[in-house]
Image (cartoon, rainbow, N blue to C red):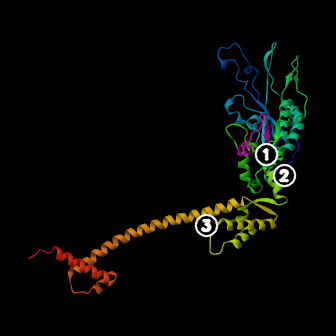
Amino acid sequence: MTAADSAPRTARVLTGYRPEDGFMAVELDPPPAEYVWHDEHAEQQEQRYGPGVGYQQWLAVDVRAGAVWFGDVDWRASREDLGGRLPGLPRRALGDGAIPAPGVVVQLLGHLTHDEQRGCSWHFFTAEELHALALRTLPAVQRLVDSVHRIGPEGALEWSAEAATAWDDIELATTQTYDPSGELLWPVPRTTPTPSWRVEVGAFLAMNPDLCDPSWGLATDAELDDYADYRPESGYGGVPGRMCGATDQQIEDGFTFYGHRAALYAYRAEVCGDRTPTDARAWLETTEAGRGVWEAAKPLGATLADVPDCVLAALAEEFQNAAHGEGLVLTGLNAHLRRLRTEERSAVDRQLVCEAGEVERLERMLKDFRAARNRTVTRILAWSDGRSDGEIARLASIPDAYVSDWRARLTDERTTTTPAS
């Protein structure tokens, strides 16, 4: 069991942010009232609002575990750096796909109200009011935590259609109004049904099984993630967009899809049945069983570089059967074996380049040495010191006939160049 599996998933206000804790973790620092104003008649835009109106309070939700807490940002700091001073990202900055670690989503709270009688006014919440607001959101937070997609052994988070709808309810619950007397009012918490325009990719696949790619069943996590991360310049992205793009089909406008990665992982899990999807490379290289199977299956007297496709397929089947005996299904196996073979063949290519270079170097040396030897043989023959062709040939490590032919050519040249008497 992973840490993600064992963590509590009950919506709750975090310790230190409750009255019974004395709000010991709360350090709110709102701007003084004299720094919060609006002058609609000011000529310059930067003069229309006081320096304190950019003060921001927030509610944070740990989507993984259900903890809720609150706080504020320094009203003196630049608003451009707001994201770096929050415990997580605002919902609108996340999109409808993955929720990045650590899985904290922030709801920024509004403070400005306006009516014809009082004009603009700001209400900054106290710790007690923020705690009451956090309590109001807990039912929606619980729905969010229960419905968000959790993917892979680490429980990576991804929005679901229901989780996105639950967050809408959180946004509604944190949108205050005021009665004519100025009393703070909150909307009644609600549980909104998931609208039909929010579609789970898993449901889309179930309705369009002919669009599914059987290769997903043995794909690695990285391959599934890459497939789910399809982002065209226009039109639908994710799994439906890629599938329909490949088959030249279109999806009716107006839908938003959720759970791209979750749907692919669920498809693979269904194909694998009760066996655990396991990365082929990791199993073959890091486990005792995998290394044993690899050593036993090595082609005798050959490397993978020399193995044709049919043998590679047989190896893959052998490895997969061995993994099945361990209760596993190897993902990315064929691609891993082809990659290994490509790497080995590339090494052979590099070896050939080195050998060819060395042959070329040696041939250049041989040419130079042969020319030097020929000059030396010619020099000795010119001495006419009485040595036989055989003696000179043995010194030069060449056949006797070569020296004889050489001597004959030299004699002819001398005869030709000697002036007539």
Helix, strand or loop under label 3: helix
Q: Nearer the viewer, mark 1 or mark 3?
A: 3
Q: Report x, y in % for residue 48.
A: 69, 17
Q: Which mark is residue 5?
A: 2
Which residue is at the front of the view, 47 or 365? 365
Q: Which residue is mark 1?
A: 157
Residue type beneath disc 3: Ala
CB atoms of marks 2 and 3 within 8 Å: no
As drawn, 15 above or below 300: above
Q: Report x, y in % for residue 198.
A: 82, 37
Instruction: Residue lying at the far left in this picture: please name it.
Output: 421
Residue type beneath disc 2: Asp
Residue type beneath disc 1: Leu
Quadrant holding the N terminus:
bottom right
As drawn, 29 above or below 370: above
What residue appears at the point 84 percent right and 47 percent down from the top-left corner?
Answer: 206
